[in-house]
């Protein structure tokens, strides 16, 4: 038996994360069929923080659509009345899913794979929206570290989710290969899996910002507490 398969997604999404402005009734995500010869179906849906499919308080429309070869389209994320019951002092986490469905092959013994993209969607209440033109310090600068033995714990006092992706002992230092990315919930905390002795007294952590950038936070530690002293792209 002969199998053929494609390892590249045909249906592409225009972003790697979604920030939903709580003041908006809906937002649009752009998708495109990168295959120039074959039409594809695009299936979309939302999940809650636990990975359960939902149709409220947000909904992805249309749930299924056909995209012609080389064409573009859009998916609307619609808020429903239940969105008003979401916390207004912090973000809420959801997941947006996009699955491509290839056309039926006319060849025999062909393995077809439906690739799926899953990204984070943060519902951000209106009062927490940040004007990108405003010259204010990033809210991530409010993060602190607490040292307990040979372990640092990240404290997030903000109303935003913060995803840390790298750790190093100084700003130009080599990233710790053992570090596992972590997402700290609003007003929550999480332990860093790299030993504090490896990161020293001026640890550097990088996070993903709203635009997919990876700014670095440099901390300065006194006793068992560390605060951000520098932030840069």
Image (cartoon, rainbow, N blue to C red):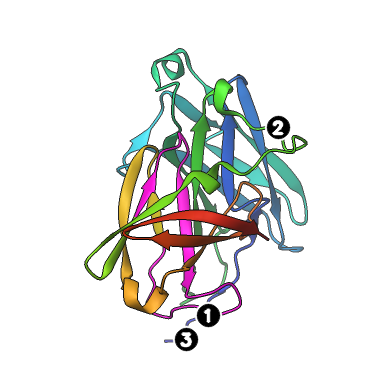
Q: Which mark is residue 4?
A: 1
Looking at the image, residue 33 sits to the left or right of residue 103; the answer is right
Dot 2 and dot 1 residues touching (CB under 8 Å)? no
In this view, the mark in front (1 or 3): 1
The residue wearing badge 3 is 2
Whole-percent x and y of residue 124? 53, 30
Of 226 and 91, the residue lying toward us: 226
| Residue 83 appears in the picture as rendered | yes
Which residues make up the magenta segment?
A: 154-181
- In the current view of this chain or complex, which residue is farthest to the front? 223
In this view, the mark in front (2 or 3): 2
**Is residue 170 shown in magenta?**
yes
Whole-percent x and y of residue 221? 42, 61
Instruction: Please name the residue shown 71% across and 42% down the image.
Output: 73
Q: CA distance from mark 1 to mark 3?
A: 7 Å
Q: Secondary structure at mark 2?
A: loop
The residue wearing badge 2 is 131
Of 155 and 79, the residue lying toward us: 155
């Amino acid at each position: 038996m002969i199998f053929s398969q494609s390892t590249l997604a045909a249906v592409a999404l225009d972003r790697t994360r979604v920030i939903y402005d709580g003041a908006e009734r809906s937002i649009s995500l752009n998708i495109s069929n990168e295959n120039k010869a074959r039409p594809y179906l695009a299936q979309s849906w939302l999940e809650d923080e636990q990975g359960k499919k939902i149709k409220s308080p947000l909904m992805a429309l249309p749930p299924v659509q056909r995209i012609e070869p080389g064409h573009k389209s859009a998916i609307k994320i619609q808020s429903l009345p239940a969105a008003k019951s979401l916390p207004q002092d912090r973000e809420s986490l959801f997941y947006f899913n996009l699955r491509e469905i290839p056309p039926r092959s006319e060849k025999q013994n062909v393995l077809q794979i439906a690739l799926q993209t899953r990204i984070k969607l943060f519902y951000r209440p209106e009062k927490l929206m940040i004007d990108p033109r405003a010259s204010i310090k990033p809210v991530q600068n409010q993060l602190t570290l607490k040292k307990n033995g040979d372990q640092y714990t990240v404290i997030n006092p903000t109303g935003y989710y913060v995803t840390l992706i790298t750790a190093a002992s100084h700003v130009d230092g080599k990233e710790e290969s053992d570090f596992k990315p972590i997402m700290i919930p609003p007003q929550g905390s999480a332990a860093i899996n790299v030993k504090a002795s490896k990161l020293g007294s001026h640890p550097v952590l990088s996070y993903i910002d709203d635009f997919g950038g990876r700014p670095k936070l440099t901390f300065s530690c006194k006793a068992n507490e560390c605060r951000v002293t520098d932030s840069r792209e």
